[in-house]
Image (spheres, rainbow, N blue to C red):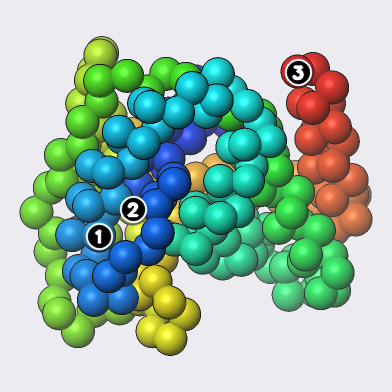
Amino acid sequence: MNRSFFGRFVITLALVAGFGLSPVRAEDEAPDAMMRRLSNEVLETIKADKSIKAGDVSKIAALVDARIMPNMNFRRMTAAAVGPAWRQATPEQQKRLQEGFKTLLVRTYSGALAQINDQTISLKPMRASPEDTDVLVRTEVRGRGDPIQLEYRLEKTPGQGTGWKIYNLNVLGVWLVETYRTQFAQEINAKGIDGLIATLEARNKANQASR
């Protein structure tokens, strides 16, 4: 996945995931209403935070843990990205895969947050029934340059506090999970689960050292 593509992913994930916000009323909201509320609020939060815009990795990582993760099913995302090998991984390996994947996303592309300036979010009509527990929310990010078409897969998670959680993201026709699944499969086929873990950890150390 190239840096330009994933830079857009980080920006748009930040717009909808609730940086600096509490998950208010989320269990009672429709998924598109939740996305609209978080998007509008978080735009102003990020624009006003100089540390985030400067690419402060430690602060971004802390905010990811506190605010983004409660709005995502990151275990499901990691399992889907790893593919069938996830079921053969031990609990410790699964934990390290989740940590490595999250750190990779945060550290490699944290600088993309500085690009948030005058973006606005437009939500497209959602085709879903009230009883649906898995929905597609389609949006468009407008600002400088061409609009960015985004689609989010959300699942309803009753009893887990936030109601709806993001588990996949489509940027300009490319699904995040499927893109990483291809990369991870190559590592697993060549080196196994431990090899993928080692590769993630090595990339994260290299990203940290380069800052």
Quadrant housing the N terminus: top right
Residue 19 in the image: x percent, y percent?
Answer: 44, 45
First in residue order: circle 2 vs circle 3: 2
| Separation of residues labelled 3 and 1 (CA atoms) | 35 Å
Q: How many marks?
A: 3
Dot 3 corresponds to which residue?
211
Residue 132 circle label: none
First in residue order: circle 1 vs circle 2: 1
Q: Residues within 10 Å of mark 2 (few under 14, many from 20)?
A: many
Residue at screen point 69% across, 48% down: 101
**Of discs 2 and 3, which sits in the foreground?**
3
Residue farthest to the top, as pictured: 145
Label 2 secondary element: strand
Q: Looking at numbered disc 2 in the image, what kind of residue is underneath it? A: Tyr
Q: Looking at numbered disc 3 in the image, what kind of residue is underneath it? A: Arg
Dot 2 corresponds to which residue?
152
Dot 1 corresponds to which residue?
34
Q: Is residue 173 in sight in this rendering? A: no
Q: Is 199 located above or below residue 162 in the figure?
A: above
